[in-house]
Image (cartoon, rainbow, N blue to C red):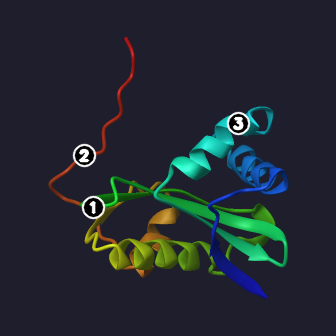
């Protein structure tokens, strides 16, 4: 049975599972070599939630926020063998619910490619008056 849970005090095995998800997505290929940094990502997030099938972590997502005003959903990932089952949608919905429970009503994210459909199903719409930007050292 699939459950969506907060991950607040991760074990070494849970850190390893999250690192494998980061590596599998290609977002952080060397994550498994940096468990202390993965731990910091988990514990430094306002919320870090995982989808579990028993003890196995099959998906993850997090909220970055000051916990008062704005929140950003980040790092939604589902292991390749479980994509297309609605797990990402469940993770996003849980993160939105947790943010709203804290009184945070401005929740944003950056959607890439086919992930836009997941976010649209959860109530997100494109921001026509804003452009995502990233700092790049020159």
Q: Earlier in the sequence, mark 1 or mark 2?
A: 1
Q: Is residue 86 above or below residue 117?
A: below
Outermost residue on the top side: it is: 138
The answer to whether residue 23 is left or right of residue 119 is right
Q: Which mark is residue 131?
A: 2
Could you tell me which residue is drawn at 79 percent across and 55 percent down? 11
Do the numbered discs 1 and 2 sit on residues whose CB atoms are within 8 Å?
no
Q: Residues within 10 Å of mark 3 (few under 14, many from 20)?
A: few
Do the numbered discs 3 and 2 sit on residues whose CB atoms are within 8 Å?
no
Residue placed under numbered mark 3 in the picture: 36
Q: Earlier in the sequence, mark 3 or mark 2?
A: 3
Outermost residue on the left side: it is: 129
The answer to whether residue 85 is left or right of residue 130 is right
Measured Cα–Cα span from mark 3 to mark 2 = 33 Å
Residue placed under numbered mark 1 in the picture: 68
Measured Cα–Cα span from mark 1 to mark 2 = 23 Å
Q: Earlier in the sequence, mark 3 or mark 1?
A: 3
Outermost residue on the front side: it is: 9
Could you tell me which residue is drawn at 84 percent across and 78 percent down? 54
Closer-to-camera residue (106/84):
106
Residue 122 in percent (x, y) is at 42, 79
Q: Quadrant of residue 49?
A: bottom right
């Amino acid at each position: 049975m699939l459950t969506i849970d907060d991950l607040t005090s991760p074990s070494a095995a849970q850190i390893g599972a999250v690192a494998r998800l980061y590596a599998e997505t290609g977002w952080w290929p060397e994550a498994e070599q940096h468990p202390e940094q993965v731990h910091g990502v988990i514990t430094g997030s306002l919320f870090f939630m995982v989808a579990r099938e028993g003890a196995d972590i099959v998906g993850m997502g997090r909220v970055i926020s000051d916990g008062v005003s704005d929140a950003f959903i980040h790092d939604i990932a589902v292991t390749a063998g479980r994509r297309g089952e609605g797990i990402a949608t469940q993770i996003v919905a849980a993160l939105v619910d947790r943010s709203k429970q804290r009184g945070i009503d401005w929740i944003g994210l950056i959607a890439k490619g086919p992930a836009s459909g997941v976010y649209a199903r959860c109530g997100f719409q494109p921001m026509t008056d804003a452009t995502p930007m990233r700092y790049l050292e020159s």
